[in-house]
């Protein structure tokens, strides 16, 4: 069997033996995930789908990556990029764990502070740290532990070379 096989209306992609499937990613965020975790520089087998049909979301991105499992701190970073994503942990071609991401209360060391005057840009010992909260309007906001400035998730992502 080849890597892909065509059925009536779907393109089937080869299953991964061990690794992770990140599903229900908001459209456009898959590239940010690949960049943040530097997956493109690794030798893992990666399948990425962009703007796929989704009953829940209308459209979604999906990433399948072999031989990778996420640590708790990595899932927190992932949740900031894709708060509604689902993680499927694959072992021996079977889903052994499935969970929904949730925004963490705090992010440590994952993103730089957009405030150019923040001490984290001067002191190497000051690891960037944000408290994360959701406004009444559903906006994800991030407050820097050091300079105490509040930024939208989108501003923090743009400042870190990622698209919101």
Image (cartoon, rainbow, N blue to C red):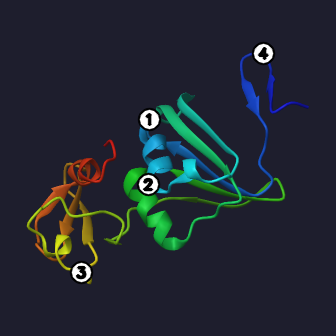
Q: Residue at x 71, y 59 (%)?
A: 67
Q: Which of the two labelled residues, at mark 1 and mark 3, occupies the earlier sequence position?
A: 1
- Whole-number angstrom distance, CA of label 3 to CA of label 2: 21 Å
Above or below — where is 159 with respect to 142?
above
Distance (Cα) linking label 2 and label 1? 16 Å
**Does 150 sit left or right of 94 as displayed?**
left
Left or right, 95 with reference to 142: right
Height in image: 102 above or below 39?
below
Q: Earlier in the sequence, mark 3 or mark 4?
A: 4
Tell me the quadrant of the picture where the N terminus can be found: top right
Image-quadrant location for residue 133: bottom left
- 24, above or below 134, in the image: above
Which residue does the numbered mark 3 point to in the structure image?
126
Mark drawn on residue 27:
1
Q: Are marks 2 and 1 in contact (CB under 8 Å)?
A: no
| C-alpha distance separating marks 1 and 3 | 34 Å
Depth check, mark 1 against mark 4: the one in front is 1
Label 3: state its secondary structure: loop
Which residue shows up at 51% across the image and 54% down it? 38
The residue under label 2 is 36
Number of the front mark, 1 or 3: 3
First in sequence: mark 2 vs mark 1: 1
Q: What separation in Å lies between label 2 and label 4 (alpha carbons)? A: 36 Å
Give the residue pinned by disc 4.
Answer: 8
- Residue drawn 81% across the image and 33% down it: 3
Q: Toward the viewer: 64 or 128?
A: 128
* Tag 4 secondary structure: loop
Percent x, y of residue 156: 24, 55
């Amino acid at each position: 069997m080849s890597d892909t096989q065509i059925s009536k209306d779907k393109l089937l992609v080869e299953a991964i033996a061990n690794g992770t499937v990140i599903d229900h990613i908001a459209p456009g965020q898959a590239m940010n995930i690949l960049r943040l975790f530097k997956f493109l520089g690794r030798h893992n087998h990666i399948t990425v789908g962009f703007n796929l049909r989704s009953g829940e979301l209308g459209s979604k991105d999906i990433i399948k990556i072999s031989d990778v499992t996420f640590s708790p701190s990595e899932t927190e970073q992932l949740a900031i990029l894709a708060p509604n994503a689902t993680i499927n942990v694959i072992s021996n071609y079977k889903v052994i764990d499935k969970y929904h991401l949730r925004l963490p209360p705090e992010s440590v060391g994952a993103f730089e502070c957009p405030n150019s005057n923040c001490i984290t840009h001067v002191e190497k010992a000051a690891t960037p740290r944000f408290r994360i909260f959701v406004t009444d309007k559903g906006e994800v906001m991030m407050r820097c532990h050091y300079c105490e400035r509040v930024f939208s998730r989108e501003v923090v992502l743009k400042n870190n070379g990622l698209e919101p």
